[in-house]
Amino acid sequence: MLQKAGRDYPPIVAKFEGDIIGYLLIFDQKILGMHPVIDHFIYQINPIKFRGEPLESLNYVMVGQLCVDHNFSGKGIARGMYAYFKKFYASSFSYCVTDIDKRNLRSLKLHYGLGFQLIGKSNIEEAEWNIVLWDWNS
């Protein structure tokens, strides 16, 4: 599944001195049917409405996972990967959607600081997740 998704949308990778220190995985709805966790996420977010329209009718891309090595946390790596992501994909998609564990305050602060907005919530495996959307049209 990751190889298929990577062919369609190569992950964004941050390196330092040749070592990978961060990555951002990118998916769209074509990944549906390839992994139960991604399927569950898509089925949860598609009915959510943004500006009166369900997400399934909007042109969006998903961040499947964003990770930064803890030794580089707080140094702008995630923000830099998102800037590159938007620059590269904003001409193909209008929106970016992801979910964040509501206990992950650092990630929530980053996403809201970039312009993501809360559009829904979900509960998965005893955790509450904030579903957030970044409007690349604004």
Image: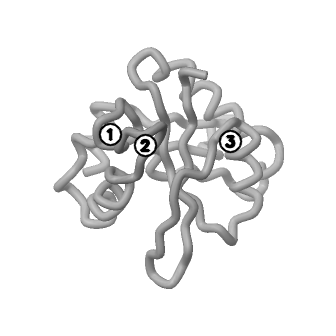
Numbered disc 2: secondary structure: strand
Q: Position of residue 14 (x, y in %)?
A: 62, 36
Q: Residue farthest to the right?
A: 75
Q: Amino acid at mark 2?
A: Met
Numbered disc 1: secondary structure: loop
Viewer-proximal residue, 95 or 82? Answer: 95
Give how far apart the Cα atoms at labels 3 and 2 are.
Answer: 15 Å
Numbered disc 3: secondary structure: helix
Q: Amino acid at mark 1?
A: Asp
Q: Position of residue 28 (x, y in %)?
A: 32, 39
Q: Residue farthest to the left?
A: 33
Looking at marks 1 and 2 on the same chain, the residue that comes earlier in the sequence is marked by 1
Give how far apart the Cα atoms at labels 1 and 3 are.
Answer: 20 Å
Which residue is under mark 3? 78
Q: Position of residue 72 (x, y in %)?
A: 77, 49
Q: Would you say the residues marked 1 and 2 are in contact, meaning their CB atoms lie under 8 Å apart?
A: yes
Which residue is under mark 1? 28
Which residue is under mark 2? 62
Q: Name the residue: 44% across, 15% down.
A: 91
Residue 25 falls in image quadrant = top left
Viewer-proximal residue, 48 or 34? Answer: 48
Residue 18, placed above or below residue 69: above
Please name which of the two marks, 1 or 3, marks the residue nearer to the observer. Answer: 1
Task: Specify few, some or many for label 3: CA neighbours under 10 Å numbering under 14, 14-19, or 20 or more.
Answer: many
Looking at marks 1 and 3 on the same chain, the residue that comes earlier in the sequence is marked by 1
